[in-house]
Image (cartoon, grey):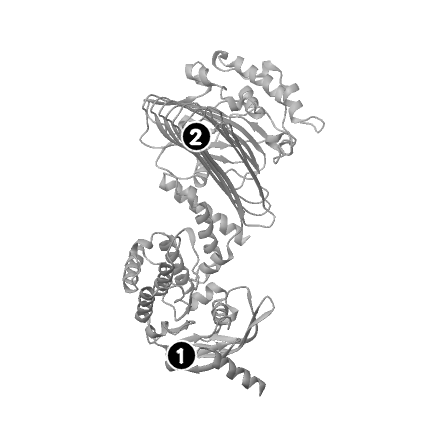
Amino acid sequence: MLTIKNLHAEVDGKKILKGINLEIKKGEMHAIMGPNGSGKSSLSSVLAGRENYTVTEGEVIFEGKNLLDLSPENRAREGIFLAFQYPVEIPGVSNLNFLKTALNEIRTYHGLAPIEAKEFLKLTKEKQQLVDFNANLMNRSLNEGFSGGEKKRNEVFQLAMLDPKLAILDETDSGLDIDALRIVAAGVNKLRSADKAFMVITHYQRLLDYIVPDFVHVLYDGRIVKTGNKELALELEEKGYDWLKEEVHQKESV
Amino acid sequence: MTSDKSFFDFISNGLPGPELRKDADNAILPARQLAFSRFRALGLPSVKTEEWRYTNIQRFLKDSFSLAQEEGTITAEQLKVVNTKVPQLDSYTAVLVNGRLQTTLSNLPAEGKVSISTLSGAANNTQLQLWFDKHPHLQQQPFAALNAALFADGLFIEAGVNASLDKPLHILHIYTTAENAFIQPRHLLVLHKGATLEIVESSVGLNETAIAFVNSVTEIILEENAELWHYNLQSSEKNSRHIYHTSTVQKADSRYHHFNFTLPSAELTRNNLSVALTGSNTETNLHGLYLATDQQHVDNHTFVDHLVPNCNSNELYKGVLLDNSNGVFTGKIHVHQDAQKTNAFQQNNNLLMSEKASINSQPQLEIYADDVKCSHGFTVGRFSEESLFYLRSRGIGEEAAKTLLVNAFAFDITDQVHIPALQDFLSEKIRRYVSGAINN
């Protein structure tokens, strides 16, 4: 589904990604871990098309298309979804109107008619129950005055509504207490399916207690320095990141 | 007029007293003469005049204009065109062409406690005699004086004690002229005790080549406990220039809700909105939204005069500016020494969608009472890149994303509109405005 080859990117002339290689297939759950500043969130930003990032080398192929040629909205329409680490508050735009606009823009792109009001309401209700999102928040302005937990749950709710092929969760666990974390993780687990893939970016292992990954990649200094299964996450929890950093530096000095 | 004669000279010298219009048995001729001397004394404002600092009005008066104020007629076909430009409401309608009521094109309420007639026909009405050109704030305004001296006609609306209508009244001001013309309509609304009205005004210019310069005055009297919802939609074409004066007097316990929407694309729009609070416990809500494109110049001057204690005024003006457009906002609040327990709030927010658009905003708070709550604020900004990216990351294209954001920006104002069809009309206008901005 997604193939990243030798991806290099920079921000304001500063090199952030220095040769990422990654292959994600349908149905897989990939966790991206790593110390602060290793480039985890930058990777998600580059994939979603944030404009202040410049790709200097490499390519990203998503479902046979060159992702880097597409605008952010067309990436979303092709099936990429980024759950933000810091969802934006937009006063005056109602959650429902926002979702309806998004759904219809995606449908138009695929040559489909706008969704019927009735069908939209049905879908909204179904997904809101599925991911346990408070119905009272749906008529409110987008994320305005939402608690940290409510914002993250809204991201998962949007994910459920827009039904992408690849969902990237950027530190969705940050700022959540354990109860909120469980609810968010349960929502994500319900959305897992054989034809969907996930990339979960997290600093801590605890999210992976609830969302069990097929692969764990460790990002350090803009590169994936180690790949393993869920056991690797446990090892990192126990030993921290320092041993990996040392390994990398030793290799470089050799 | 010729190039060596200014507009002022043209009017002052070219029109001695006798040429002032004669109304039904000249009942208001003395008032017209008085106003004409006032205009002469005040002179034509320039950028050196404080109130006109950011609006070089002389630039807009350089062309030659006819003062004849032709009657102007429109066909049913033209009315259809007008109807595509104004909101379609479940309402009564009063159609005016160049300030003159067209009864056959209108749909006025049956005769009752709310009477709608022409100003010229009501010259002997005691209310008109009582209120005509009496508003204190009109006395210092040269164009209001000029209007009083030379106006052709307009509406006189009187709502009796506790009167109301079952539907809003939509007043369509249509301006059309074959040659450049200086058109001066004048209206007077008197709401007696406890009366309630909902009025939507739409101004539409039909000119394709000639310039219509419209200098209008609307005087509004709200007697005790009267309430007026007053929407003013300004959507004339390019070669229209407008100075609108709206001057309201509020007596005790009255409520005035004013909405001013300036839409593309008249070259000049100057609004002089002033409210004098002469009785206690009043409520005044002034809302303004201006969307400007091209070289449009939109100037909103507002004045809330707190003369007595215990009055509340709340003012919110928002602007979205494109291309080379200019915005001006001057909000004056005067709290007199006696006006204790006044609450007066004012806010002006602007969204600039182009590097070349500009806004000059100045609050003017003069507070002489000590037990009051007053505040003012001004912001100017551009689209939040983060908000735009968030929307785009959900599959929403740039145009739809910006439409959502401009609608969101205007929401505080449009949400206060009590007529759903009018809300829909405005959000459609906003959609087209943003779409035009992006696709140009």
Q: Is residue A83 above or below residue A234?
A: above
Q: Amino acid at mark 2?
A: Thr
Of A204 and B111, which appears nearest the observer? A204
Q: Residue at x 28, y 59 (%)?
A: A125
Indicate which label's residue lies in the foreground, 1 or 2. 1
B83 shown above or below A80: above
Q: Residue at x 56, y 15 (%)?
A: B34
Residue A230 tag number? none
The answer to whether residue B234 is visible is: no
Which residue is at the front of the view, A59 or A112? A59
Indicate the chain on which mark 2 is placed: B
Chain at numbered mark 1? A
| SS at mark 2 in the image | loop
Does B261 sit left or right of A195 as displayed? Answer: right
Q: Which SS class for mark 1?
A: helix
Q: x, y percentage for residue A86? A: 44, 61
Where is B145 relative to B210, above or below?
above
Using the numbered discs, state the Cα–Cα distance from disc 1 to disc 2 in whole angstroms.
65 Å
Horizontal relation, residue B348 to residue A12: left or right: left
The image quadrant that residue B194 belongs to is top left
Vertically, is A228 above or below B137?
A: below
Residue B17, x across and y down, in percent: 60, 14
Badge 2 crowding class, 10 Å Cα cut-off, few under 14, some 14 to 19, many 20 or more, is: many
Q: Could you say which is closer to the camera, residue B346 or residue B37?
A: B346
At x 44% / y 57%, what residue is drawn? A88
Q: Which residue is mark 1?
A: A238
For disc 2, the marked residue is: B342
The amino acid on which the numbered mark 1 sits, given as a three-letter code, is Glu
Q: What quarter of the picture does the N terminus of chain B occupy?
A: top right
